[in-house]
Amino acid sequence: MAWTREEIDDRLSRRLEPVLSSRRTAAAVTEVVCSLQPAQQERVLALVDVAAASNEEIAYQFLLHVPEALRKRGPHGLRGWLMEALDRYDRGGMYPAVQYLNEIQREERFAGASANQAVPLDDVVRVLETYVNGLSRRRLTVTAGEALFTDGETLFLPERLGLFPSAEDNFQLYKVMVTLQWAQLANATFRLDPRAVAWPAGSPATPADDLGGLEAFVALFPDPDLATRLFLLAEGVRLEAWLGGDLPGLARVLGGLKERLAAMRPMIGGLTPRAVLFDGLHRWYLAGRVVTGPGGDARMVAEAVEKFASLRVPGATAEASATVAAAVYPLAAGLPGGGDAAPVPYLGELRPGQVAATLRRLRAGEAHAFRTAVARLLGKLPERGAEERIEVRPQGETDKVRRGDGVRPVPAVVDYELRVDGRPVEIASELRALIHTVIDDLGQIPPEYLVAGGNAPGYAMSDGGDRSPRAAAKQEGFLYDEWDYRRGSYHKDWCLVRELPTAASAEPVVERALAKHAGVVTTLRRQFELLRTEDRWLRRQRNGSDIDLDACIEAIADSRAGSEPDERLFTRVQRAERNIAVAFLVDMSGSTKGWINQAQKEALALLCEALEVLGDRYAIFGFSGVTRLRCDFYTIKGFDQHYDDGVRMRIAGIEPQDYTRLGAAIRHTTRLLAEVEARTRLLITLSDGKPDDWDHYRGATGIEDTRRALIEAKRREIYPFCITIDREAHDYIAHMYGAVNYCLVEDVRTLPRKIPEVYRRLTR
């Protein structure tokens, strides 16, 4: 569709009206749009609508810089550029967003920036997290950040990758990034010993005995940033060599990506001598040969390359990388200018100070958890000596095998046993996992870990309390993204969920409900008892207690037809083993006043009575709140809490509160459910209407965010279902939950009977 100048001016005047004035009219941005091709006009005007929905000033600034962005990012990179600006607006307000848009004027165009198959991190973050946590002993989180780096607990990646024209290649580049960031943690990048570095003549003095780690190493140089950059490149060489031995498939993929990155790398003139050195090193790193750009000194680059190439051997350590960095440092430091050559895109940055702080906190928590687990173990032993001698030893024969931080004896089958006074004792899975984590991290179990302590009787906490990330988050709340369907992306860390204490009431609500529905309670208990002990017939078994008539008939027919008959001709009974965890999420918004609130309480009372018979793990949560910064979340019964008088009083205390920001509540419940080990995990929402909040979280905005939150839950193998009493629910709830994942209770008075019936049907 071709737009006339008048139509464009009218549309922009109306869309940007709040930021226009007599001195600032739509004429300038109208001229920008008119200069574009018709297809580009459609794309740009659609993006203006997206930007203006968040802020009209950002939309105006976006239009001013569109021609330059098209030249440097291409038409398919335009959306990603705007999304980054809007994300900066969400995090920091107007100034950072506008500043980012203005920077397009100074940005150097990089080959591949106009790729039309850019991959948003949001689309692949769960896959990447699952992948990297399959490699890592310690739980790692993947999230978007302003740079590519790790703080020791979180891997920060670019929000979008569009270096390659193929979405698959961009995804593989993400995979390489998370692998190398994890490899730094797993292969002692941050834990090197400066005293073990082979320092060349004239290098910094040897550090004090009590100083160690990468932070201490780079602090020994006059220019720590230069030392860090050289060490990062050396570690890239070392870790890629390790990658070829331990993950050869990914190494082959990386080889192909490096060839393309080398071909895409622009030749830049006017670089400083130091930047020329780094440019030559980066070209060798990618292409495997010495190639210098304009003004490059091939002999100087080759001299440095020879040292880096020495790291391409099995068993190279972080200390070897530090030795290379120390050897090349005088050469680089003697060259004028900065090291501003374009970096290798997937190496990122090293932030040793942040990693050191994180590891100190994690080690304090692990030490406390280890001592607590040892205390519990000792408390269960039938016979105990006066002074227990506790040790951790590898099981089986030991071989010398290559580890990330050197060659050390480890068992051929990597497992460990704990001995008390020389006798092996059985250890719980929690302690076994801790043993593996600590040995991977420190190389051994420190002697101070092998002392009972923690929360065991007679011992005091020595580290000041629970320092886990979850405990730290609880001090303020939990931040969650929120989906904006107009943008097609998330608002980052947008909603603050606060876990609040649930009010208790002494009113005998549960007792009255059980008396009122006594007949229903008896029936439910009987039905759930049968469900708990339900037997299932397995057909087509090789042996069993009865004959499978259908299988026998088919076997006879196959035999007469000349085919070999199936030998599985029996049936047998198998006791069904339930392994279910379910979270009930109760709408506590103001619209549940009166009969609805009363019916909710009665339904929960009956449900708890039935579930106690069944034995499934279950929790009950409530939610309400006002705006994205006050999403209130109430624990009525946690997974680890017994159904007692306290829970009954909290059920009685459920009262209508404020609004229904359902997406944030679902994300927090998903987080809690994901921590529960179960074969089947259900999230059942009890609500009376659409998502709604005071700050425009209604209509399509609330519905689409809720739908996205439910999709996120399904990706984590959590199955959502909704029980609603909204007669208009068919208009929107099937879109959120799916056509078969909800039920409508038209008469609120039947709710106490309906909820247990639905649960029984879902878990059969």
Image (tube, rainbow, N blue to C red):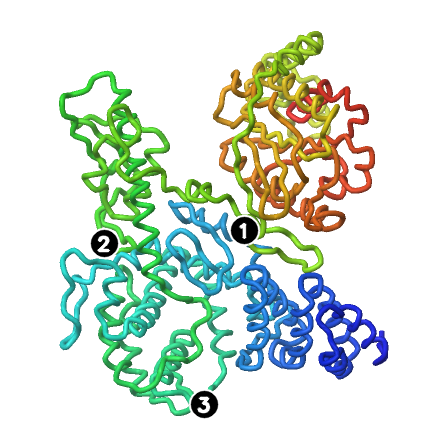
Q: Is residue 312 left or right of residue 175?
A: left
Report which residue position mark 2 lands on. Answer: 407
Q: Quadrant of residue 245?
A: bottom left
Which one is in front in this view, the residue at disc 2 or the one at disc 3? 3
- Cβ–Cβ below 8 Å for labels 1 and 2? no
Measure how far apart labels 2 and 3 are at the Cα level: 44 Å
Mark 3, Cα crowd under 10 Å, few <14 / some 14-19 / many 20+, is few
Q: Is residue 485 left or right of residue 475?
A: right
The secondary element bearing badge 2 is classed as strand
Q: Is residue 572 visible in the rendered structure shown here?
A: no
Which one is in front in this view, the residue at disc 1 or the one at disc 2? 1
The secondary element bearing badge 1 is classed as helix
Q: Quadrant of residue 337?
A: bottom left
Mark 1, Cα crowd under 10 Å, few <14 / some 14-19 / many 20+, is few
- Cβ–Cβ below 8 Å for labels 2 and 3? no
Q: Is residue 50 visible in the rendered structure shown here?
A: yes
Q: Nearer the viewer, residue 120 or 609?
A: 609
Report which residue position mark 1 lands on. Answer: 127
The secondary element bearing badge 3 is classed as loop
**Percent x, y for residue 250?**
46, 59
Report which residue position mark 3 lands on. Answer: 269
